[in-house]
Amino acid sequence: MAELHSGEDILPHIPDNLTLSQFMLDYQHEMRPARSSKTPCLVDDSTGKSLSFESLRLQTEYLANGLYIQYEIGERDTVMIFSSNHMNYPIVLWAVHKLGGIVSFSSPQSTAEELAYQLKIARVTYLVIHSNLLKVAQDAAHLVGMPSDRIILLDARSAGGAHDVFSLINIGGRSQEQSYQECQLTAGEGSTKIALLCWSSGTTGMPKAVAISHRALIANILQMAVHNHINSLCTSRDSRSYRPGDIALGVLPFYLRSEDVAGLVIGLHLTLFAAMTVVVIPKFDFPALLKSIAHYKINHLIIVPPIAVAFCKHPATQRYDFRHVKYVLIGAAPVSRQVQDSICRLCPAAQVGQAYGLTEMTTTLSMVSGSQRRGPIGSAGRLLPGIQARVIKPDGSLARCGERGELVVKGPGISLGYLHNQKATKETFRDGWVYTGDEVSLSADQEVFVHDRLKEFIKVKGVQVSPSEIEDCLLSHPDIAEACVIGIPDDYSGEIPVAYVALTNSAVDSLNGNRVPVSYYINSFIKASACPTTTKAHGLIFVLTARSRP
């Protein structure tokens, strides 16, 4: 295998003169199915409030008008959203795009120092936040010298009157005319104009702001639409993965980061493009999540491995019937055979598979194909149309099918690089290719098997140890609910593996040394009430490693 080219000839027209807002709200692409007036776009999980497509479109226009009237936000501005999932999230995102601005995001788990770092790197001019995060936002703004009147509440009315999304929508709606001139791109400009600044640690190091163009986002949506036969005349409605009127679970974070490839682009934009409804879940709580799935008859689950493991191991799962679920997509990190088999048993009518991607490629590179009932065990899906892929072995040669090496890719969703960081950009983006830092193998039919992060191996006495293999072994034990393995420095071995485990009882001792090869011997277990609810990515490993060091 020298190089794989995945169906570039079947990609439809990808507009390069539209903003993401225009593509989602104003443009009727040939791949886009019609939305019934009875099918809402968004439903608030906690209140049941819904937003129709027309309401979503109108509120976006009003907010853009209000933002311009109140702040004169325009092409020179970068607006950061600092919030958990909320109905107003896409309204803010698209309103800023109407004004020609850039949108960035920060995780609601960020500290004031972390947020300040992102505000500085992204050169943020306005901060839209959840009211619960006001103190953190104020502290971060103080650290970078941002005036407090540039903090806008996303979910509640402010005491000052105008500094919240609801008031700005009212201001924009009351205006007798549109005060702003909507951003209009010339042909080709969509490929170079930044839409989003999203955070990734790349192959290593501090978080970097990935600059993603409007066309790259639109391209990734259309790649997935083709891959899943959305609006295809060649497939019946029942055989499609994404169908008008389906109800999707919006639990993955809408803020885009390397650990959460599915939330913003798949969980929000692709599902809305496919004329589906998204039930917006602001905070992950597994028992409450199960109730929401049952209450709203959610039949489309887009989840990450910790949630998949909870489905398999949490006792509350047994109280619910999931036969109405038609689709389960697991993204962000591989899951074991045991987890995938358990999901298939719980959701017998569902198409079940995995997805893989990275922020540097605007998220998704591969996902279970619309023509597959079950994705092969261990596969992160097939390459999307338009993706070119190489697997490079440590000696620099190209791997054959089934051989492991670093995945190197290019495609229409490639980002513009890291903002204000030429050194890191040159390391990851080389001659039009993105070096992912992931060890993978590819099959002849373009299935992607992700084995590990090249930079996250633990080197024990000269032997490369895979954390994910140890974690899979631990999770196979019925008494372990969650596990994360890291390496810490050791004078004798170089590094030693340490496992963080959340137990269902005290039987973990039986695992120490059992069923794990000698070279993978676990030095110690650290009992935790729960492992952090995130994926196996740089942030989690960094935190746990820091905790484990003296």
Image (spheres, rainbow, N blue to C red):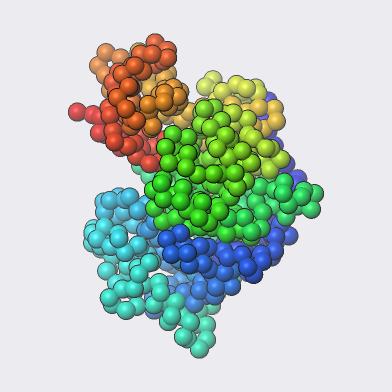
Q: Nearer the viewer, residue 480 or 550?
A: 480
Frontmost residue, 74 versus 48:
48
Query: Residue 440's spot in the image, x, y percent?
Result: 55, 28
Would you say 486 lies left or right of 99 here? left
Quadrant of the snapshot with the C terminus? top left
- Give the camera-side residue of 414 and 439: 439
Compared with 162, 214 (above or below) is: above
Q: Residue furthest right?
A: 234
Question: Quick check: 70 left or right of 30?
Answer: left
Instruction: Give the residue at x 59% y 44%.
Output: 323
Residue 118 at x, y percent in the picture:
35, 53
Task: Count numbered badges in the picture.
Answer: 0
Up/down of 403 relative to 108, above or below: above
Q: Position of residue 365 (x, y in %)?
A: 59, 41
Q: Is residue 493 left or right of residue 362?
A: left
Q: Position of residue 475 (x, y in %)?
A: 42, 27
Q: Measuring 58% from the left and 65% from the top, which residue is drawn there?
A: 40
Give the residue at x 45% y 24%: 476
Report the side of 73 relative to 301 (left or right): left
- Quadrant occupied by the N terminus: top right
* Residue at x 34% of width, y 30% of height: 504
- Residue 540 in sight here: yes
The residue closer to the viewer here, 41 or 461, is 41
Name the residue furthest front.
319
